[in-house]
Image: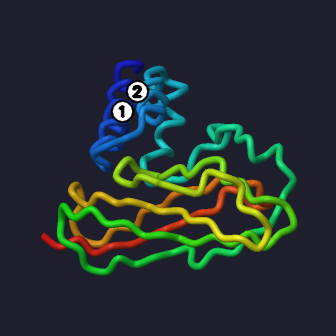
Amino acid sequence: MKKTLSIIALSIIGFGLVSCKKENKETQSSEAVASDSTAAATSVTTDSTAAPVAGTTPETPASNQPSTTVALSESNFDFGKIKKGDKVEHIYEVTNTGKNPLIISEVKPGCGCTAPDFTKEPIMPGKKGKITLHFDSSSFDGNVQKYADVYANVEKSPIKLTFTANIQP
């Protein structure tokens, strides 16, 4: 019985790793823990494109800051058709519409194929900041949708940014 559960857990972990060529170390270490039967049951519901499991969200310094509000230029972007292997990026503009400084503490992509850059210093009320998502299409074919969670001192954190692309051979 234990052997069967271990094989299932390893299969799921392998599928998760194959679905995205590069994974960050935190994801790999949490998946590697899925070797006993209780962890295997939890890992069934997770993969590199699913939302984080409850309780895995890191404590962020922004949660201790006074809350503010934010407006996004857009929350979803379509790259359209791109050639396999292309490395593309898109800049999402954020505007602090509240009365307190906006602090982006972390931008966490759902996949190792996406790398974030973001405004690290506090964004004062009325001012703008940027979140750039860099996407490496090398491991994908056809239509893909990816996301990144933005952790900041806003009421409904994290904010989900998404993008789509149609990857051509």
Horizontal side of residue 54 vs 138, given as left or right: right
The image position of residue 53, as x and y in percent, is 59, 43
The image position of residue 21, as x and y in percent, is 27, 46
Horizontal side of residue 39 vs 71, given as left or right: left
Residue sitting nearer the eye, 57 or 38: 57
The image position of residue 24, as x and y in percent, is 41, 38
In this figure, what is the number of numbered marks? Answer: 2
Vertical order, 149 against 32 (above or below): below
The image position of residue 168, as x and y in percent, is 17, 73
Residue sitting nearer the eye, 3 or 74: 74
- The amino acid at mark 1 is Ile
Label 1: few (<14), some (14–19) or many (≥20) C-alpha neighbours in 10 Å: some
Task: Say which residue label 1 marks.
Answer: 8
Residue for point 54% across, 66% down: 161
Task: Say which residue label 2 marks.
Answer: 5
User: Are the residues at dot 1 and dot 2 in contact (C-beta closer than 8 Å)?
Assistant: yes
Label 2: which secondary element: helix
